[in-house]
Amino acid sequence: MIEATTVSALARYLKDLLESNLTLTNLWVEGEISNLTRSQRGHVYFTLKDANAQIACVMFQRQYRGAPLERGAQVLAHGNVSFYEQRGNVQLIVDFVQPAGVGARQAEFERLKEKLAADGLFDEARKRPLPSFPARIGVVTSPTGAVFHDICNVLGRRWPLAEIVLAPSPVQGAEAAIGITEAIRQLNRLIDIDVIILARGGGSIEELWPFNEEIVARAVYASSVPVVSGVGHETDFTIVDSVVDARAPTPSAAAGAVAPDWRDISRRVDAMLLAVSSAAMSKVSQSAIHVDRASRRLASALPDTSRYAERLASLLRHAAVGLARGLDQRRERTNAYASRLRALDPAATLSRGYAVVQIRDGRQAVTSVKQVKGDERLDVHVKDGRFPAEVSRQYGF
């Protein structure tokens, strides 16, 4: 028994079949516009035809943006073939239209430029300043061409302190776009790269075309390291030149853009040292003048101390005289007191033949006969000692 498929299943299969065919994607189709209509939602429907065939086309409102669509116009349309399941017809989903006659490559250039500009890849606000004194400079170019040699020569003359890191890649041909993209990513994985030079020599539009590829433009946009382009000659201009942080007209100029000239730096340092030295000398000179002026003002403000010095010397002389006189007076009084004390000294009395009598038990000096009774024991003190004495009762008073 044969099992039937549904219309929906068949339509889905046809849609998947067409949209998975790489031959039917990223197409450029040239033809004449006819049956042009615009929907209320802003979508544009038309037919592209030539003398033998035609194909339905739709351009959605977000891609339209005022494209040059007019009945009878001969155009180049870019898009992908799709199958519209609801109506069962094949159509070209158009995302860019260019008037015919400019060539497919130029039309692709304009299409991609418009697309990337809409995505913000060309915004000036996102572009970063280049480092002033790069230590490691990454270079994406062919290792066999003259370009890398020229870049090394320029950097060696201008800034020999920098290390050059080559990320080799083909710069023309079918593999170039993928190689350039991977080289940029490799340099971004090295954490100490300060700036990247993306370079190749001059050539035809076909030879420079890898620098117009979307994957290369987006790799440059995604780079965390500033990128400088030096692609072709001064008149050559690629999509990448609009994405990079800085564009140079040639590879050698790109090397000059990323590195300062050490001779200029040396001259600037010398000039700064001279300026600092001159400023310091001027400051010292001005300070010396200020100090001298301040010293003179201070000297003029101080009082004349010479007369005070004379007065002080006179006071010191008078004080010395007064002190000596006072000492003499005190010495005389002291000598007088000493003489009086010597006169009162009992030892002096004893030396003249007198004696001092004391009652032995009471240690009282005998000054009257009334103090002495019979049998009294006495101590008699003379000049050179003492001796005991006793009063007989028969001699009582």
Image: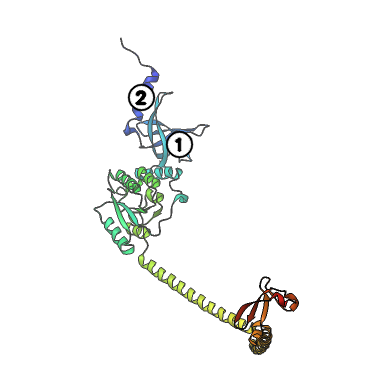
Task: Tell me: 351 left or right of 235.
Answer: right
Q: Is residue 321 above or below residue 156?
A: below
Q: Nearer the viewer, residue 40 or 156?
A: 156
Q: What residue is rendered at 38% in x and 29% in y?
A: 82
**Which residue in the protein does label 2 denote?**
14
Task: Tell me: 268 left or right of 202.
Answer: right
Element under label 1? loop
Q: Mark 2 or 1, which is nearer the eye?
A: 2
Q: Position of residue 318 (x, y in %)?
A: 67, 89
Q: Position of residue 375 (x, y in %)?
A: 69, 73
**Dot 1 alpha-carbon crowd within 10 angstroms: few under 14, some 14 to 19, many 20 or more:** few
Residue 71 tag number = 1
Q: Count all numbered tags in the image, as a single digit.
A: 2
Q: What residue is rendered at 37% in x and 54% in y?
A: 195
Q: Nearer the viewer, residue 92 or 101?
A: 92
Element under label 2? helix
* Image quarter of the C terminus: bottom right
Residue type, numbered disc 2: Leu
Q: Is residue 271 above or below residue 77?
A: below
Q: Nearer the viewer, residue 143 or 356?
A: 356
Q: Position of residue 94 (x, y in %)?
A: 41, 35
Residue 317 tag number = none
Q: Earlier in the sequence, mark 2 or mark 1?
A: 2
**Dot 2 alpha-carbon crowd within 10 angstroms: few under 14, some 14 to 19, many 20 or more:** some
Residue type, numbered disc 1: Arg
* Image quarter of the N terminus: top left
Q: Is residue 168 above or below residue 44?
A: below
